Image: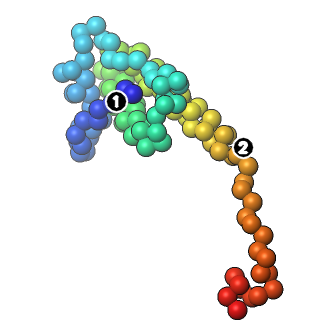
Amino acid sequence: TASFHASGPRRGLEEFYDARHRSKAPEDGAAGRAWEACELRRKSFNDLHRLWWTLYKERNVLLTESARARRNGMRLKYPQRKAAVRKSMARIKQVLAERRKIYREQPVPELPEDDDAGEGAGGLA
C-alpha cells in the first residue's frame, strides 16, 4: 500500500503558507495526483482519517495561496493541485459512504431468547 507523509507540526499562520511546496515541488509543477477510489478502498479507516486531515490542511494551504495570489493580481502557480485535492477528498467520502451502506445492509444478529424469563432480572433471583 502507498504511504503518505505528514510533515512536522507547524503553528500559527505558517501552517497555511506553501513554503514546503516551494522547496520540494518539482519544477514542472507535478505535485502529485488525486487518489483513486480503488486505492482508497484498500486503506483502513484510520489511514483514511489521517489522509483526510492531510488533504484538508493542503486544501487550506491552497486556498490561502490562491487568495494571496488573487490579492497580488496573480494566478495560482499550479491550479491542478486544487482539483487533485478536491477529487481525493470527494473519493474518500465516496469510499466511506460505500462502507456505511454495506454496514447498514448487514443483518442485525438476533439475541438468544432467555429461557429463564420468569426468574427475575437476568435470572439472578
Residue 105 tag number: 2
Residue 6, given in percent of the width and then of the height, sits at 29, 35
Residue 3 tag number: 1
| Left or right: 75, with 27 as reference point | right
- For image coordinates 32% across by 26% down, the residue present is 65
Tell me the element at label 1: loop
Instruction: Give the amino acid type for the residue marked by disc 2 in the picture.
Output: Glu
Residue 113, given in percent of the width and then of the height, sits at 78, 70
Q: Quarter of the image holding residue 116?
A: bottom right
Using the image, determine if residue 80 lies above or below residue 110.
above
Tell me the element at label 2: helix
Residue 37, given in percent of the width and then of the height, sits at 53, 25
Which of 85/79 is in front? 85
Q: Quarter of the image holding residue 78?
A: top left
Q: 10 Å neighbourhood of mark 1: few (<14), some, or many (≥20)?
A: few
Instruction: Give the amino acid type for the residue marked by disc 1 in the picture.
Output: Ser
- For image coordinates 21% across by 27% down, the residue present is 19
Q: Earlier in the sequence, mark 1 or mark 2?
A: 1
